[in-house]
Amino acid sequence: MAWEQKQKIYIVNTTETNAKQLANLMWEYPQGRFLPHVMAAEQDAGKAPVNIGTLSSLKPTDVVINLCPEAIPPPDRFSRVLEIVPFANDEREASRAKFKTYRNQGITPRTHEINK
């Protein structure tokens, strides 16, 4: 939806390998729909609406989708930070820690359950 609203998106991955795997998947899915994207380290990254990279290469953008176990530092410099909370309990601990980090920074996270 953010892309359709002409917002710039940065998808943060844990490693460069994970980022490349996601970029490859985005060529195939969703079927029948293409999301224009590029690796953040590429020269023309600023021209694409969706950049994919790691936390260390995070650049100014409108929307950040965080796929890392660490919180985005400092999150208030972006319009929105989206955190994907895994279903598995052992993986949810990182999400709980990020939620607390954001609250300690004076941010009130909002939650949306998308898989009912």
Image (spheres, rainbow, N blue to C red):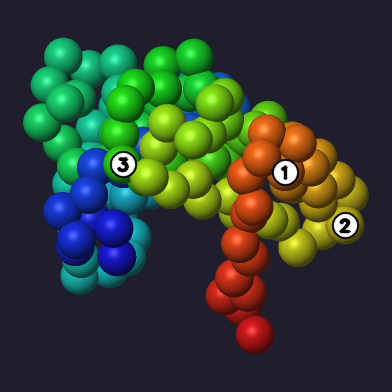
| Residue 74: percent from left, percent from top | 54, 26
- Residue lying at the far bottom in this picture: please name it: 116
Q: Amino acid at mark 1?
A: Arg
Labelled pair 3, 1 in contact (Cβ < 8 Å): no
Mark 3 Cα shell of 10 Å, populated few (<14), some (14-19), many (≥20): some
Label 2 – label 1 distance at C-alpha: 21 Å
Relative vertical location of residue 44 with respect to residue 116 in this rendering, above or below: above
Which disc is residue 103 wearing?
Answer: 1
- Say which quadrant the N terminus sits in: bottom left
Camera-side residue of 105 and 113: 105
Q: Is residue 89 left or right of residue 8?
A: right
Report if residue 29 is visible in the image: yes
Mark 2 Cα shell of 10 Å, populated few (<14), some (14-19), many (≥20): few
Camera-near label (2 vs 3) is 3
Camera-near label (3 vs 1) is 1
Mark 1 Cα shell of 10 Å, populated few (<14), some (14-19), many (≥20): few
State the image quarter where residue 58 is shown.
top left
Q: Residue drawn 72% across and 43% down?
A: 103
Labelled pair 2, 3 in contact (Cβ < 8 Å): no
Please name the residue that numbered disc 3 is placed on: 62
Label 2 – label 3 distance at C-alpha: 30 Å
Relative vertical location of residue 87 with respect to residue 7 in this rendering, above or below: below
Secondary structure under the numbered disc 3 in the rendered image: loop
Please name the residue that numbered disc 2 is placed on: 89
Q: Amino acid at mark 3?
A: Asp
Which label's residue is closer to the chain start, 2 or 1?
2
Label 3 – label 1 distance at C-alpha: 20 Å
